Image: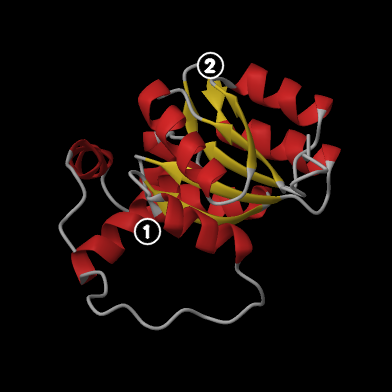
Amino acid sequence: MTDPAANQPTLLLVDDDAPLRDRLARALAQRGFAVTTAESVKAGIQAAEAAPPAFAVVDLRLGDGNGLDVVAALRAARADVRVVMLTGYGNIATAVAAVKAGAVDYLPKPADADAIVAALLAKGEALPPPPAEPMSADRVRWEHIQRVYEQCDRNVSETARRLRMHRRTLQRILGKHAPRD
């Protein structure tokens, strides 16, 4: 899918939010990518298998499943693909899962095209500078609980047992929104 005349790198954009997908596709095309879009896990996997792209931007939660399935298909089709995950449901557990699946970065929605391109083209293993405003202790605790909850396949009883807390206490914590940073 690379345009030989323009020598554009190929990019697959998978997101079920049509306005966001269309806006990002235009912005990424303006930044030199030959963009193909898909609106579902099924369409994303088909596009990845039909013409494995050099780059991909995949939403974590899609209408018909999990974007991590698309990442796995991309990795199977082309080992050197650089994938950035997007999500409106950011937490450490899903970020870790995305990186383990093969994503090079994980960005919260709404991410702008410049941040996506920077993540896609980043080289090396250099650590980013420390945050100007790091997470609060309450937020770190909440993130840890979310990670264990995800690792226990969203089983409240098993999560409570592993965290050594009362099941009802855990249910109250899970029912609340994340603390502010």
Question: As drawn, is 178 to the left or to the right of 30?
Answer: left
Mark 2 or 1: in front is 2
Q: Which mark is residue 144?
A: 1
Q: Is residue 50 visible?
A: yes
Q: Is residue 45 above or below residue 106?
A: above
- Mark 1 residue type: His
Residue sitting nearer the eye, 143 or 68:
68
Badge 1 element: helix
Locate residue 126, reporting x and y percent.
58, 82
For the N terminus, which image quadrant?
A: top right
Q: Which residue is mark 2?
A: 64
Residue at x 55% of width, y 29% of height: 66
Q: Earlier in the sequence, mark 2 or mark 1?
A: 2
Tell me the colour scheme of the image: secondary structure
For the C terminus, which image quadrant?
A: bottom left
Locate residue 91, reporting x and y percent.
38, 51
- Mark 2 residue type: Asp
Residue at x 48% of width, y 47% of height: 94
Q: Is residue 169 above or below residue 142?
A: above
Question: As drawn, is 134 to the left or to the right of 152?
Answer: left
Q: Is residue 151 visible?
A: no
